[in-house]
Image (cartoon, coloured by chain):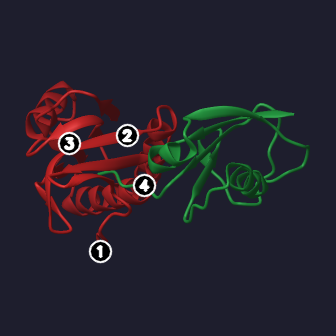
């Protein structure tokens, strides 16, 4: 399991491959599920130019660990990877990666979805949008279900 | 007794500070502390989320000396 807060831009797909290369689960995993959240240039009809993501050092990591431990108890998972950006983020940069590995697809699919939704509703991150007309804190996330 | 208080995101901007150390009486809850902060700062803020020692707590959670209390708006990560 790896949970990391990143201050620098990352390529979620490359990171997933680097992580998998280091794991010793060849022959055991038959399913990989992943979610990648990427920076858009619009939200609520506004032209967004960049985004700044703030977090609560210590609590954010701790909360993500609690979410992952809950998933490990509920599903048969071989491994979990979470990467999340903070700081200033440009259009098309990846913001979040959640990846899960399991023997069969049910565990990987379901856990990836639930981890992502729990991250959205509880992990202490806050987005501030810089738009062509000003700066604004995002007040709530869109529903995932 | 004393607790340290942290604010994040829009709430930090509203409060004009990221953190402070506050003297409180014994046996007060996190929501009672929040109400006293709102009154002393003369601000209004709905939908606050509360954590003590980096874990979410209910509003009636009783504070202890040295606790790290955090107040912040609804989270918007991902």
Counting residues from the start of the chain, the first of labels 2 and 3 encountered is 3
**CA–CA distance between discs 1 and 4?**
17 Å
Q: Check disc 2: other Cα within 10 Å, few if <14, some if 14-19, many if 20+.
A: many
Between circles 1 and 4, the one closer to the viewer is: 4
Q: Is residue A144 above or below residue B5?
A: below
**Place of residue A8 in the rendered image (x, y in percent of width and height, measured from the top left):** 21, 27
Identify the hue of chain A. Answer: red
Task: Pick whichever, A79 or A51, lies toward us.
Answer: A51
Q: Check disc 4: other Cα within 10 Å, few if <14, some if 14-19, many if 20+.
A: many
Identify the hue of chain B. Answer: green
**CA–CA distance between discs 2 and 4?**
10 Å
Which residue in the structure is indicated by mark 4?
B75
Q: Are marks 1 and 4 on the same chain?
A: no
Between circles 3 and 1, the one closer to the viewer is: 1
**Place of residue A11 in the rendered image (x, y in percent of width and height, measured from the top left):** 10, 35
**CA–CA distance between discs 3 and 1?**
31 Å
């Amino acid at each position: 399991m790896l949970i990391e807060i990143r201050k620098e831009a990352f390529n979620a797909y490359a990171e997933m491959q680097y992580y998998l290369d280091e794991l010793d689960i060849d022959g055991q995993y038959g399913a990989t599920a992943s979610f990648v959240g990427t920076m858009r240039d619009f939200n609520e009809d506004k032209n967004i130019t960049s985004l700044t993501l703030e977090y609560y050092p210590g609590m954010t990591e701790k909360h993500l660990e609690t979410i992952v431990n809950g998933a490990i108890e509920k599903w048969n998972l071989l491994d979990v990877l979470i990467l999340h950006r903070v700081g200033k983020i440009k259009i098309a940069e990846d913001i979040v990666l959640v990846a899960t590995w399991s023997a069969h697809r049910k565990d990987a699919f379901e856990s990836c979805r639930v981890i992502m939704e729990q991250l959205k509703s509880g992990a202490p991150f806050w987005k501030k949008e810089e738009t062509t007309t000003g700066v604004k804190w995002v007040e709530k996330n869109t529903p995932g279900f | 007794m004393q607790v340290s208080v942290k604010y994040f995101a829009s709430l930090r901007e509203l409060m004009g500070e990221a953190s402070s150390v506050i003297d409180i009486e014994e046996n007060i809850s996190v929501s009672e502390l929040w109400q006293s902060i709102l009154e002393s700062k003369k601000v209004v803020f709905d939908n606050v989320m509360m954590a003590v020692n980096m874990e979410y707590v209910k509003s009636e959670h009783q504070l202890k000396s040295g606790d790290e209390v955090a107040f912040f708006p609804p989270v918007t990560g991902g």
